[in-house]
């Protein structure tokens, strides 16, 4: 039997397959993100892979200004209880904290990325 | 209960190197040499007395080795810990504990950077994890911008209140002949300056300068025979809860709440006992968060605390009397300068910006993106 893939490799392979993978610690019943080999909550190693449903809320947002224009950077809280850095598609200045967003795996670049589309009005 | 090491060690010498933009060709080690020579001379000690060296560097991963060699010291303890800008506050606390335990006699803490001469951007070898780096935030400002935006969202903190932090720093800097930025600065100037990472403008950010600093510590017993009035380490604490911002449990509460509680416990003092306060102000949100987390005001009330000149000269609490990283100097890491200014305030030698009769000082260092928080309490002989 071959060794399981490295956590980040399995995560990136998930994105290439169009899904946002995260881990679940079966010892302390908590989500783990970013992927690793032990649970940062309890130190246990009983981590199983799950796939996020992709529903999230913007926890915080900024717009980075540079000569190349403006780009948004956000922190998104996923419904499954983990937080990740990402960006929201569309006008970065229109992104409000508390607004609902939906996962979209962006495969247009060199590597697939988990980004988010606006899903509705601020909650 | 206060710590067994409370008051067992003292700061006996402090100095900066050249600051601002240093003469061409001077290296970071040259600046450490300048600062060390100044601090040891003030202390009445020589490099041969130093048996513990504490430093860190953006240039040398093995910073303690190359620094010891340059200075010609042969330390029993060579500590090149790098937990960001808070490093030197942590090293002062660790040195105090080592001195109290009898393991160290004379500790030298030193740092420098030539990042302005190098090109005017933060020099660092630190890298974000790919999970954050792939979204191209601007390090480190976007991290602090995200924390600022969340604080504004939860508590109604305003950009005007944040601008007051920069203006207060500037007003203190105008009283400090060594400060780099001393021209007039208004709230309107801060709000109207170039936006870098919303909601932070370039005037919400610390300076980029060259510079270095050194702090010499020894036992309370030996300190009493040295030329300077000793400044005692009364307590301190460290805490860290993440490195990458997405892993920070709550963007509006930093680990300063933990490090501060430890500092109060070990010193047997509290916020109301502090005469002067030095807070690591890499960005204008920092003092707001730290004033809350260290207990100078309630969570969410930091904006109101700094408003209306609250931390400016003549305000309700003297904070960052040197002008801070926002207006005095900021060579990549600022922690050593917090210790230097607190020491000078407690010796009563800061001239126009002196806080009259200051006997106690709170020093708080931040490292990384609100990741390492280190608090120390310093005091004069009559606080022992």
Image (cartoon, helix red, strand yellow):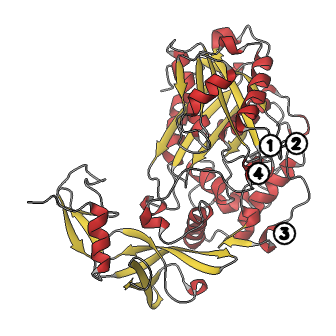
Task: Answer whether labels 2 and 1 touch (C-beta < 8 Å).
Answer: yes
- Residue B342 appears in view: no
Badge 3 element: helix
Question: Which residue sits at x=70%, y=33%?
Answer: B29
User: Between disc 4 and disc 2, whose residue precedes?
Assistant: 4
Badge 2 element: loop
Task: Answer whether labels 3 and 4 touch (C-beta < 8 Å).
Answer: no
Q: Are marks 4 and 2 on the same chain?
A: yes
Gap in Å between the C-alphas at discs 3 and 4?
A: 23 Å
Residue occupied by mark 1: B322
- Residue B222 appears in view: yes
Neighbourhood count class around disc 4 (C-alpha, 10 Å): few under 14, some 14–19, many 20 upward: many
Residue occupied by mark 2: B176
Question: Which residue sits at x=26%, y=60%?
Answer: A6
Badge 1 element: loop
User: Between disc 3 and disc 2, whose residue precedes?
Assistant: 2
């Amino acid at each position: 039997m071959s060794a399981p893939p490295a956590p980040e490799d399995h995560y990136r392979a998930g994105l290439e397959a169009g899904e946002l993978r995260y881990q679940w610690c079966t010892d302390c019943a908590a989500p783990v993100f970013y992927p690793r080999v032990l649970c940062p909550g309890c130190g246990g190693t009983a981590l199983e892979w799950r796939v996020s449903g992709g529903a999230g809320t913007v926890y915080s947002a900024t717009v980075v200004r540079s000569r190349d224009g403006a780009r948004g950077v956000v922190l998104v809280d996923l419904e499954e209880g983990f937080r990740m850095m990402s960006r929201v598609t569309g006008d970065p200045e229109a992104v409000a904290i508390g607004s609902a967003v939906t996962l979209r795996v962006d495969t247009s670049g060199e590597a697939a990325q988990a980004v988010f589309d606006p899903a509705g009005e601020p909650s | 209960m206060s710590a067994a090491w409370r008051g067992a060690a003292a700061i006996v010498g402090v100095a900066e190197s050249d600051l601002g933009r240093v003469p061409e060709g001077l290296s970071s080690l040259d600046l450490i040499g300048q600062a060390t020579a100044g601090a040891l001379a003030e202390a009445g000690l020589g490099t041969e007395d130093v048996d513990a060296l504490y430093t860190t560097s953006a240039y040398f991963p093995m910073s303690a080795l190359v620094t010891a060699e340059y200075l010609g010291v042969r330390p029993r303890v060579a500590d090149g810990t790098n937990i960001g800008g808070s490093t030197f506050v942590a090293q002062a606390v660790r040195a105090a504990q080592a001195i109290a335990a009898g393991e160290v006699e004379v500790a030298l803490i030193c740092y420098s950077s030539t990042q302005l001469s190098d090109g005017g951007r933060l020099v660092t070898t630190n890298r974000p994890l790919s999970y954050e780096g792939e979204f191209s935030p601007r390090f480190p400002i976007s991290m602090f911008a995200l924390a600022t935006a969340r604080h504004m969202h939860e508590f109604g903190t305003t950009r005007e209140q944040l601008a007051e932090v920069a203006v207060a720093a500037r007003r203190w800097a105008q009283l400090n002949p060594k400060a780099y930025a001393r021209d007039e600065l208004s709230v309107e100037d801060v709000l109207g300056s170039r936006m870098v990472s919303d909601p932070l403008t370039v005037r919400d950010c610390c300076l980029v300068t060259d510079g270095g600093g050194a702090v010499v510590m020894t036992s309370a017993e030996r300190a009493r025979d040295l030329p300077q009035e000793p400044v005692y380490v009364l307590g301190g604490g460290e805490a860290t809860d993440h490195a990458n911002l997405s892993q920070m449990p709550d963007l509006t509460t930093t680990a300063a709440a933990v490090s501060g509680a430890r500092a109060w416990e070990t010193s047997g003092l509290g916020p109301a006992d502090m005469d002067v306060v030095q807070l690591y102000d890499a960005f204008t949100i920092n003092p707001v968060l730290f004033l809350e987390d260290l207990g100078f005001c309630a969570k969410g009330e930091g904006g109101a605390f700094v408003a209306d000149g609250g931390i400016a000269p003549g305000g309700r609490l003297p904070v960052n009397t040197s002008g801070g990283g926002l207006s005095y100097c900021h060579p990549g890491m600022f922690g050593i300068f917090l210790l230097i200014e607190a020491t000078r305030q407690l010796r009563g030698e800061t001239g126009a910006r002196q806080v009259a009769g200051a006997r106690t000082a709170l020093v708080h260092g931040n490292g990384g993106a609100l990741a390492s928080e280190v608090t120390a309490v310093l005091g004069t002989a009559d606080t022992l």
